[in-house]
Every structure is written in structure tokens, then in C-alpha cells.
């Protein structure tokens, strides 16, 4: 009697495995979509150029106008 009632539940494991595989596939798809160049809305967090660092220091007030212009001219 127990074998008859347990046999009805064996179909659920393959369905759960299939659902898990579909979710993993979807997750892999979404991760690869986010890594494609040109799809990000935020700027890339790559290496910062010397000019960007100089501009940031000037914006924070770490250097004055004269020093900013002198260093900017040196970079160009």
C-alpha cells in the first residue's frame, strides 16, 4: 500500500530539477547580458586617467586654480 502512494510523488523530483535548470540558465543569460559592452548605463569602472584624477582633485578643492591649470597644461 505504501508503494502505491509513494509512486505518485516520484514525478515531482524531475520537475523540480527541470525548474532548477531553467532558473540557472536564466541567471547565466542575465549575467552575460550585463557584461556586454555598451549595455551598461553607468560608466565603466576602468582605469582612471590622469586628467580625470586632476579634475576630481580640483572639484574637491585639493588644488587651486593656478595649480590645476599648470598641471593640466603639463598633461596635454
Image (cartoon, grey):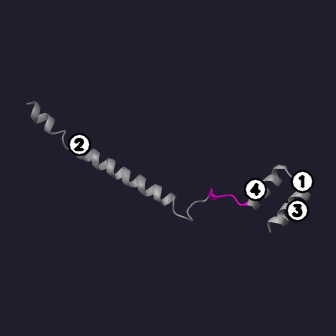
Q: Residues within 10 Å of mark 3 (few under 14, many from 20)?
A: few
Report the mark closest to the observer, 1 or 3.
3
Residue drawn at x 69%, y 58% is: 48
Indicate which disc, 2 or 3, sits on the residue closer to the N terminus: 2
Q: Spatial distance from mark 3 to mark 4, Cα to Cα?
A: 14 Å
**Residue 76 quadrant:** bottom right
Badge 1 element:
loop
Q: Which circle marks residue 18 in the picture?
A: none
Residue drawn at x 88%, y 62% is: 70
Marks 3 and 4 close (CB-CB < 8 Å): no
Q: Which circle marks residue 64 in the picture?
A: 1
Q: Spatial distance from mark 4 to mark 1, Cα to Cα?
A: 14 Å
Residue drawn at x 55%, y 63% is: 39
Residue 11's place in the image compared with 63, above or below, is: above
Indicate which disc, 4 or 2, sits on the residue closer to the N terminus: 2
Dominant SS of magenta comes to: loop
Q: Which circle marks residue 12 in the picture?
A: 2
Q: Spatial distance from mark 4 to mark 2, Cα to Cα?
A: 58 Å
Q: Which residue is mark 4?
A: 53
Marks 4 and 2 close (CB-CB < 8 Å): no
Indicate which disc, 2 or 1, sits on the residue closer to the N terminus: 2
Amino acid at each position: 500500500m505504501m508503494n502505491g502512494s509513494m509512486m505518485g510523488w516520484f514525478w515531482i523530483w524531475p520537475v523540480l530539477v527541470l525548474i532548477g535548470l531553467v532558473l540557472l540558465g536564466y541567471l547565466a543569460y542575465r549575467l552575460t547580458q550585463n557584461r556586454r559592452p555598451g549595455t551598461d548605463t553607468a560608466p565603466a569602472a576602468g582605469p582612471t586617467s590622469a586628467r580625470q584624477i586632476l579634475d576630481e582633485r580640483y572639484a574637491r578643492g585639493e588644488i587651486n586654480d593656478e595649480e590645476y591649470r599648470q598641471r593640466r597644461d603639463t598633461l596635454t
